[in-house]
């Protein structure tokens, strides 16, 4: 294989036994460096772990690597375990972190850890897991960290060097093998650069003259169908069209299906392949799959988290076959999934961040824009942004595209489970861990003091609630250390014997309530009496926990349970089809499957706790059987997709 200069440099550094951070644009070939490391490890009978931020990316990497490495590849993601003793293991970062704490012996023969999308260090909810994984990585393992451009990558390298001592090299590549052109649609016209956009769209507005008033009268609203016809006529397919709303993705797809993107020969191949994949994944009678037919026939599809995972995989395979020419999708499609196109379109350059609509981060923009331009196929890639000057300011547009990516900043906030593991090993010396964190490395004195105070407050609660007794963990502490993310509530439910008193279905209802995160329109729901009765048994405990946390000034508070999916998981546990089970929930099928799979992961964590009694373990196994089947069975889906 012919390598680019930055790939050669990175590979040479790994050969010298150095850890390496590689920052390069999306689509530039970072994976080739990871593959070299994997090949060397296999040759030398050494193990290697490949971590990714999300399960769908882990699954895709497993499929891709399985074709290359066969029996040498395994996967562990919490709800999937295939060939778990293989020398090359794909993991989510959470599973790697858990292994560091719970079974470090397993890593004895592992010589490399590959962190894909390492900029997840600054993810508010999950960044701490990445930080823990780097801090506690065994000294015999080397780190290969891959990311799109991080402006403070050398700072992160210096931090890793400060805690591990071994050499670490930073490789930065700014050039894309396929250059990108940034084009704008505004007032239903195309502007080939930012200067044209400013002069023709924003300048009249900024001058506040009669010219602007007359321009407003002449200006037309942006039309999606006109943009897509332009792209078809100028040979800029295939197209990935990013929208930040599941509903809008579907609406847009049906809105433009008057355009036919495929030839009669391509249509025939598409229909044949779609039929075969629906058969393969047992989706022939699935309503959401049948709904796609009029779009697929035109070379159009949509893809988002609300779809069944198996249906998403069907769409992904159709797109990689190059028969689908236009796909409407949410931003998760951009995250590491190898689905390049010739053109990327942004429905807008704003998104809802949980509290308000704001402009995209530059890093997010380039993560998605980087899907434009297929290496070895296209000479150039095209990125079209649809601009409404009333919704986004010119400087915001300019900053998103031209100001460069944001630095990666630590979100360090150790979970109760992690603190319990650390206390079991180091007791009061666990506070010495904080100075090893990226947060400490990046922060000033006052910020460091606040972070340390938060750790002390959490330890105080764990002692107050008798998770820690003297210098050791109590049974409650050991239990809590095994259930990441829901430690206090699950432990209190267990210690008060509420958990063991639940039936199999009730156990599933309680666990899905811990996982479910309602969107704004999902908070208030009417629940049947049987689920309200379960809620009444759980609510007093979480109220006590959150009251105690407020008293100790702990943030964020332990999450409250939401029982919105109680009906769905009850019906599913009784054998009802998913389409029927989800009625009355207001949730999409894909959303439900994702939460049910999270329940499976918690059940497996509970089952592994050594001191639970056999009758409870039997009930856990029965609860697992009730939900881990058909569309929810992630392992079955992954095996079928190989």
Image: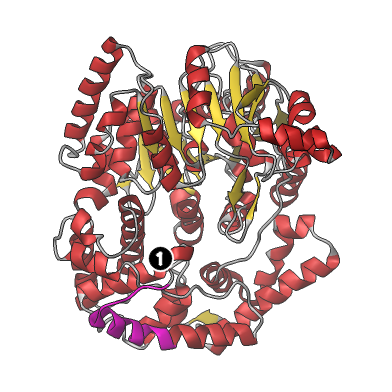
Inspect this view and state whether residue 466 appears.
Answer: no
- The location of residue 384, given as percent across then percent down, is 60, 27
Inspect this view and state whether residue 78 appears.
Answer: yes
Secondary structure found at label 1: helix
- The location of residue 133, given as percent across then percent down, is 57, 53
Task: Give the left or right position of residue 624, taking residue 332 as reference.
Answer: left
Q: Quadrant of residue 272?
A: top left
Task: Give the left or right position of residue 568, taking residue 168 as reference.
Answer: left
Range of residues picked out in magenta: 524-540
Task: Give the left or right position of residue 293, taking residue 427 as reference.
Answer: left
Q: Give the residue at mark 1.
A: 515
Task: Give the left or right position of residue 489, taking residue 462 as reference.
Answer: left
Nearest the camera: 137 or 220?
220
Magenta highlight on residue 523? no
Q: Is residue 133 above or below residue 508?
A: above
- The location of residue 131, given as percent across then percent down, is 62, 54
Nearest the camera: 216 or 387?
216
Q: Is residue 334 above or below residue 69?
A: below
Q: Quadrant of residue 601?
A: bottom left
Magenta highlight on residue 528? yes
* Residue at 50%, 61% in the rendered image: 101
**Mark 1: few/some/many CA within 10 Å (<14, 14-19, 20+):** many
- The location of residue 257, given as percent across then percent down, is 36, 28
* Residue at 27%, 21% in the rendered image: 270
Q: Is residue 214 above or below residue 574?
A: above
């Amino acid at each position: 294989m012919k390598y680019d200069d930055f790939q050669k440099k990175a590979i040479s550094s790994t050969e010298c036994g150095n850890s390496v951070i590689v920052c390069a644009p999306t689509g530039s070939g970072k994976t080739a460096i990871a593959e070299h490391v994997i090949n060397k490890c296999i040759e030398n009978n050494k193990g290697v772990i490949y971590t990714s931020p999300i399960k769908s990316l882990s699954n895709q990497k497993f499929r891709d690597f399985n074709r290359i490495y066969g029996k040498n590849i395994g996967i562990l993601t919490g709800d999937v375990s295939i060939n778990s003793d293989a020398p090359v293991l794909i993991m989510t970062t959470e599973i790697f972190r858990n292994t560091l704490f719970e079974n470090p012996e397993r890593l004895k023969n592992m010589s490399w850890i590959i962190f894909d999308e390492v900029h997840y260090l600054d993810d508010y909810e999950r960044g701490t897991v990445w930080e823990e994984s780097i801090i506690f990585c065994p000294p015999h393992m080397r780190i290969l960290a891959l990311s799109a451009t991080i402006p403070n990558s050398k700072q992160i390298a210096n931090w890793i060097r400060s805690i591990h001592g071994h050499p670490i090299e930073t490789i930065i590549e700014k050039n894309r093998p396929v250059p990108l052109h940034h084009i704008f649609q505004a007032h239903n016209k195309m502007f080939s650069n930012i200067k044209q956009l400013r002069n023709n769209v924003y300048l009249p507005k900024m001058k506040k003259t009669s010219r602007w008033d007359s321009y407003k009268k002449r200006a037309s609203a942006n039309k999606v169908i006109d943009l897509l016809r332009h792209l078809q006529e100028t040979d800029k397919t295939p197209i990935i069209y990013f929208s930040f709303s599941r509903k809008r993705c579907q609406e847009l797809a049906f809105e433009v299906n008057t355009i036919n993107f495929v030839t009669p020969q391509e249509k025939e191949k598409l229909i044949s392949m779609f039929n075969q994949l629906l058969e393969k994944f047992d989706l022939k009678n699935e309503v959401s799959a049948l709904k796609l037919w009029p779009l697929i026939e035109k070379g159009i599809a949509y893809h988002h988290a609300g779809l069944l995972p198996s249906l998403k995989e069907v769409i992904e395979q159709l797109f990689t076959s190059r028969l689908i020419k236009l796909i409407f999708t949410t931003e998760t499609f951009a995250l590491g999934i190898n689905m390049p196109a010739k053109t990327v379109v942004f429905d807008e350059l704003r998104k809802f961040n949980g509290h308000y609509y704001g402009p995209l981060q530059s890093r997010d923009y380039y993560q998605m824009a980087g899907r434009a331009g297929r290496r070895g196929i296209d000479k150039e890639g095209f990125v079209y942004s649809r601009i409404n000057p009333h919704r986004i300011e010119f400087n915001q547009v300019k900053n998103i595209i031209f100001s460069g990516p944001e630095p990666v900043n630590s979100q360090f906030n150790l979970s109760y489970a992690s603190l319990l593991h650390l206390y079991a090993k180091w007791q009061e010396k666990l506070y010495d861990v904080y100075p090893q964190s990226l947060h400490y490395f990046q922060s000033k004195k006052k910020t460091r003091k606040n972070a340390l105070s938060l750790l002390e407050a959490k330890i105080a609660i764990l002692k107050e609630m008798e998770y820690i007794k003297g210098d050791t963990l109590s049974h409650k502490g050991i239990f809590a250390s095994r259930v990441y993310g829901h430690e206090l509530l699950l432990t209190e439910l267990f210690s008060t014997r509420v958990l063991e008193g639940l039936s199999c279905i009730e156990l599933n209802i309680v666990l899905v309530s811990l996982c479910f995160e309602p969107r704004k329109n999902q908070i208030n729901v009417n629940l049947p009496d049987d689920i309200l009765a379960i809620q009444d048994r759980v609510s007093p405990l979480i109220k006590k926990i959150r009251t105690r946390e407020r008293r100790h000034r702990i943030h964020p508070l332990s999450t409250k349970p939401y029982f919105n999916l109680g009906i769905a998981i009850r019906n599913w546990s009784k054998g009802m089809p998913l389409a029927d089970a989800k009625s009355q929930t207001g949730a999409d099928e894909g959303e439900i499957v994702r939460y049910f799979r999270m329940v499976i992961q918690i059940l497996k964590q509970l089952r592994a706790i050594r001191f639970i009694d056999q009758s409870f373990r039997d009930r856990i196994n029965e609860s697992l059987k009730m939900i881990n089947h058909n569309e929810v069975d992630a392992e079955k889906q992954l095996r079928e997709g190989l």
